[in-house]
Image: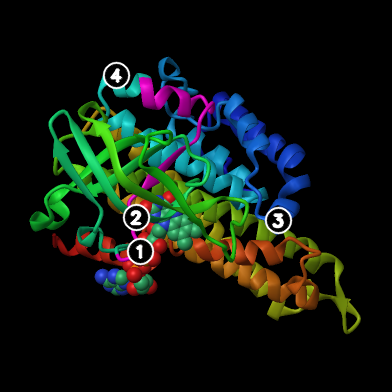
Amino acid sequence: MSDTALFPLTDEHKMIRDAARDFATNEIAPIAAEFDESGEFPLKTIKKMGEMGFMGIEVPEAYGGAGMDTLAYVLALEEICKVDASHGVIMSVNNSLYCHGIMNFGTEPQKQKFLTPVASGKAIGAYSLTEPMSGSDAGTMRTRAVRDGEEYVLNGRKSWVTSGPVAEYIVAFFMTDPEKKHKGITAFLVEADRPGFVRGKKEPKLGIRASATSELVFEDCRVPLENRLGEEGDGFKIAMTVLDAGRIGIASQALGIAEASYEASLAYAREREAFGQKIGEFQGISFKLADMKTRIEASRLLIYNAAMAKQQSKGTAKRYTLQSSTAKLFASETAMFCAHAAVQIHGGIGYSKEVPVERYFRDAKITEIYEGTSEIQRLVISRSELGLR
Ligand SMILES: Cc1cc2nc3c(=O)[nH]c(=O)nc-3n(C[C@H](O)[C@H](O)[C@H](O)COP(=O)(O)OP(=O)(O)OC[C@H]3O[C@@H](n4cnc5c(N)ncnc54)[C@H](O)[C@@H]3O)c2cc1C
């Protein structure tokens, strides 16, 4: 059982958490292993999640969303990720990396056109910052956007785009002034049916295999001025502000994986016997369970704290970078710790595709990498504490 009893969850929070739990148990659990194996994108279940309001939880109803708060979002996401981290990352990117940026920086016409279809789950959104030669260091990006009258011409190759093979709309970042490095980045909203937009190589992945990840190629792709998100040069600020929100989502994904690993381990430790006793009676196993449980509950506190900081920041320019980075760092390392322990507790069967802990182990790793690696989180946290830029 998770220890949420002390949190002031409203009836609405409990309702969305329970709805997500039921949906994950009834609709995702039966297909998770199969889609992990094939790497097929789970379009049908993602569409159903859209109908249930899970793809735009914090977006106001006027723009197609569910109009709920950040705590509702993390509660729902945790339940989905506890069953399948692939569905979870598609949901997280749609909510946090796509919708959140447009809600915060979009004009009214941009919200009508680009937010409503994605928040309602009718279309899928993606966020494209990373490039083959530029990941943690976004200021070195090589893609270019050049203004030509009332249009911009986009050129270059983006990489590692979650939902890249299926997204109808993309928030993408291009360099407009290379001399200014990160201050020369500009954000654009791109429709996938624009001439000059090509979906590139699909990535074969270790984990979250049912989430589709690909390159995106821009070859003289023209977008009108009204597709620019924010002002020229605002792109880095937009990208980082959006990542503050995104990291809370990835932390929730990590928490879901950690909990699934823990619950499977607890059940196995209660039933498996060795040397005439349940393996849970060996201190070597029971202490692992104690460490898993403690880290899970600490992660939960950090995530709820970050969710509340985000909620309180709404309508202000206040950032919650520190809360979001600490939650992401700790929860992702907890997911890896718990998934690693879960395979160990299961012994040989833990290494088999016949039990899901093998999938949790592969899925956990990505939470330490995307939306800022653990090294980058440590950089963000320590700079904030030291008062450095
Ligand atoms: C499955 C998957 C999905 C993804 N989805 C998206 C997406 O939807 N959109 C998107 O834009 N990107 C996405 N990414 C990209 C992801 O965010 C980057 O891979 C990540 O930020 C790291 O960048 P990199 O791979 O270029 O590694 P690099 O930046 O090259 O880092 C390599 C290593 O060096 C370390 N390092 C770098 N700089 C420092 C430093 N200053 N101090 C200490 N160590 C450092 C890193 O921590 C890492 O260990 C995805 C990646 C994957 C694998």
Horizontal and vertical percent position of residue 229: 24, 34
Q: Residue at x 58, y 40 (%)?
A: 5
Q: Tell me if residue 15 comes above or below residue 349 in the rendering.
A: above
N-term-proximal mark, 1 vs 3: 3
Look at the image and give the residue range highlighted in magenta. Answer: 113-133
Mark in front: 2 vs 1: 2
Res. 157 in view: yes
The residue at which mark 1 appears reads as 132
Q: Is residue 131 magenta?
A: yes
Residues under labels 4 and 1: Cα distance?
A: 33 Å
Amino acid type shown at disc 4? Pro
Residue lying furthest right:
276
Say the numbered circle drawn on residue 109.
4
Picture quadrant where residue 23 is located: top right
SS at badge 4? helix
Q: Nearer the viewer, residue 276 or 175?
A: 175
Amino acid type shown at disc 3? Ser
Residues under labels 3 and 4: Cα distance?
A: 39 Å
Picture quadrant where residue 105 is located: top left
Q: Nearer the viewer, residue 339 or 8?
A: 339
Say the numbered circle drawn on residue 157.
2
Q: Residue at x 15, y 47 (%)?
A: 176
Amino acid type shown at disc 2? Arg
